[in-house]
Amino acid sequence: PVIDADVIAHQLVEPGQPALEQIITTFGMELRQRDGTLDRDKLRQLVFNNPTQRQRLEAILHPLVIKKLWAEAHSSLFPIAY
């Protein structure tokens, strides 16, 4: 199976996921849209030319993405038969 880090990163910032809450706490409520989703355009504007802000975002997302990547890789290496 293919494990896509970009897909995982998108999943981690869906409403109700801890990464979204950490991003909102770190960068502000204006990044939450009315429907509860992340305003990716505003986040992009915030971090695009600001290495400090980008590092703050990466410090939130990268550990969570890596953890999920390892979990998915491990589960695909050791399938469980029912």
Image: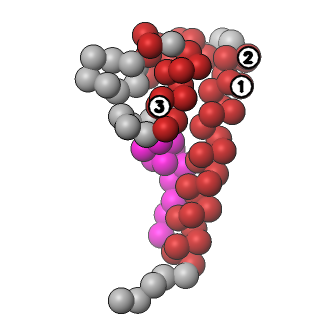
Circle on res. 55:
1
In the image, residue 26 above or below residue 30? below
- Measured Cα–Cα span from mark 2 to mark 1: 5 Å
Image quadrant assignment for residue 58: top right
Report the mark closest to the observer, 3 or 1.
Answer: 3
Asked if residue 82 is among those painted magenta in the image, a careful observer would answer no
Circle 2 sits on which residue? 52
Percent x, y of residue 30: 43, 10
Circle 3 sits on which residue? 20
Q: Main secondary structure of the magenta part?
A: helix
Looking at marks 3 and 1 on the same chain, the residue that comes earlier in the sequence is marked by 3
Instruction: Give the residue type at disc 2.
Output: Thr
Asked if residue 8 is among those painted magenta in the image, a careful observer would answer yes
Residue at position x 53%, y 64% from top? Answer: 72
The range drawn in magenta is 1-12
Answer whether labels 2 and 1 touch (C-beta < 8 Å). Answer: yes
Instruction: Give the residue type at disc 1.
Output: Gln
